[in-house]
Image (tube, rainbow, N blue to C red):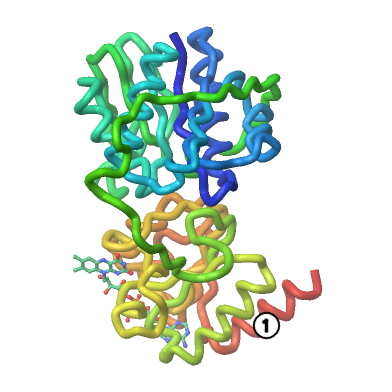
């Protein structure tokens, strides 16, 4: 029996989320006296995959036939299912992102396994399997129990953190039996939204709201983000008005992120916005209105004009 971790292959690279997922699985495995096995699909170099050993993975199945470089969720679900049977996995972990959310529910139906998304912590019990999860867009935490033989989880990014726990990693080739992998759906094109740091992977996020007044003024936030090595984000009206790209919008109807530091600049802090960032370790609110709701959730607050504060902050960070 083992714990199977689905490792996301992003054009031959691993993302921090896969390392964190492996560390999470290792903590479960230590309690249960199990091994952590990974599954990666598509072409990716062993040198890159070896990083997983630093976080406690001991065995990795690699289905690296080129034909799997195109992700087709139906096909990937079958591949994961075969890996589950191969290693007799009782727990199957996916990242809590679009890919995990697409494959995990399909697999749950095929395996008749309980599926718990948006997991916030390690299980509090294994018999029965009980864990805390995010509920109602972050306004509540639910404690749920799965009564199935197998359990599928998607732990949220940054809910556990990166904990090193080095193991020797054995990488094995895995050849699933899939007939006509791409017969129903074929990926015919792909356009990356933007160069640069992706929001989900960023440790620091600099985000702007309607208080920034125009799309041109976001140059100030971009400068601050460049100084901090941060990604940029925005509130929904900013994206709706076309001041920023739609994929930067965070909140209930946008992306859910959990960086270490989130700068909310000229953002009122409406609940629909906070729903997307409440997982941040530290929220810094910058707003001219001392009554703005963002200050109710902020760890640090600066009351004042963003157009004065941002250049000063930028100069300060540049010095240090
Ligand atoms: P505003 O509410 O206009 O706030 C601007 C803020 O800037 C104010 O607090 C003001 O004091 C401050 N300000 C102004 N000038 C300055 C200055 N010079 N310096 C510093 N501060 C200044 N919103 C999201 O963001 N994400 C979502 O996913 C989302 N989903 C939604 C889903 C539904 C169903 C609904 C109904 C709404 C949703 N919204 C969402 C919208 C949300 O309710 C708010 O309207 C929105 O978040 C407000 O955006 P804002 O804070 O940028 O703008």
Q: Position of residue 217 (x, y in %)?
A: 50, 89
78 on left or right of 307: left
Task: Tell me which corner region of the image, top left, top right, bottom left or bottom right, holds residue 187.
Answer: bottom left
Quadrant showing the C terminus: bottom right
**Left or right: 9 as drawn, with respect to 137:** right
Residue 301 seen in the figure = no
Tell me the element at label 1: helix
Question: For this rendering, which residue is in front, 139 or 133?
Answer: 133
> In the rendered image of this protein, does residue 29 appear above or below residue 60?
above
Q: Is mark 1 within 8 Å of ligand 1?
A: no
- So how many labels did they put on this image? 1
Q: Which image quarter is the N terminus in?
A: top left
Q: Give the x, y percent position of residue 179.
A: 30, 31
Q: Quadrant of ligand 1?
A: bottom left
Whether residue 275 is visible: yes
Camera-side residue of 80 and 56: 80
Please determine whether, in this image, residue 116 is positioned above or below residue 229.
Answer: above
Image coordinates of residue 67 in percent, x first then y, are: 43, 42
> In the shown orientation, is residue 70 left or right of residue 109?
right
In the rendered image, which quarter is residue 195 located in? bottom right
Local crowd size for mark 1, using a 10 Å CA cut-off: few (<14), some (14–19), many (≥20):
few
Q: Nearer the viewer, residue 312 or 121?
A: 121
Query: On screen, 297 above or below 4?
Result: below
**Near-viewer residue (110 or 283):** 110
Residue at 40% over, 25% down: 176
Q: Which residue is under mark 1?
A: 312
Drawn side of residue 181 relative to residue 315, left or right: left
Look at 49% across and 61% down and name the residue there: 199
Q: Residue at x 66, y 22 (%)?
A: 169
* Residue that extends furthest to the right in the rendered view of this protein: 319
Residue 15, position as x, y percentages in the image? 56, 46
């Amino acid at each position: 029996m083992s714990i199977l971790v689905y490792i996301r292959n992003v054009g031959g690279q691993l993302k921090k989320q896969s390392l964190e997922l492996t560390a999470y699985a290792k903590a479960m495995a230590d309690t249960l006296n199990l091994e952590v096995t990974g599954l990666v699909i598509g072409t990716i170099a062993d040198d890159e995959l070896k990083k997983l050993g630093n976080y406690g993975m001991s065995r990795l199945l690699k289905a690296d036939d080129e034909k799997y470089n195109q992700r087709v969720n139906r096909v990937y679900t079958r591949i994961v299912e075969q890996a589950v049977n191969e290693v007799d996995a009782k727990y199957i972990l996916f990242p809590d992102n679009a890919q995990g959310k697409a494959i995990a529910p399909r697999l749950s139906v095929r395996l008749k396994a309980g599926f718990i998304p948006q997991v916030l912590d390690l299980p509090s019990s294994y018999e029965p399997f009980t864990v805390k999860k995010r509920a109602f867009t972050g306004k509540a935490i639910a404690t749920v129990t799965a009564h199935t033989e197998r359990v599928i989880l998607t732990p949220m990014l940054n809910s556990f953190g990166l904990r090193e726990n080095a193991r020797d990693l054995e990488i094995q080739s895995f050849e699933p039996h899939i007939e006509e992998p791409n017969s129903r759906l074929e990926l015919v094109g792909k356009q990356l939204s933007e160069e640069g740091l992706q929001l989900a992977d960023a440790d620091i996020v600099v985000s702007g709201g309607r208080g920034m007044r125009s799309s041109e003024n976001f140059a100030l936030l971009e400068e601050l983000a460049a100084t901090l090595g941060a990604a940029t984000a925005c509130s929904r009206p900013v994206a709706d008005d076309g001041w920023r790209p739609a994929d930067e919008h965070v909140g209930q109807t946008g992306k859910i992120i959990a960086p270490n530091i989130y700068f909310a600049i000229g953002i009122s802090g409406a609940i629909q916005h906070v729903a997307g960032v409440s997982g941040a370790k530290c929220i810094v609110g910058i707003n001219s209105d001392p009554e703005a709701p963002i200050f109710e959730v902020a760890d640090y607050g600066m009351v004042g004009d963003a157009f004065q504060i941002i250049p000063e902050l930028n100069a300060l960070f540049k010095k240090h």
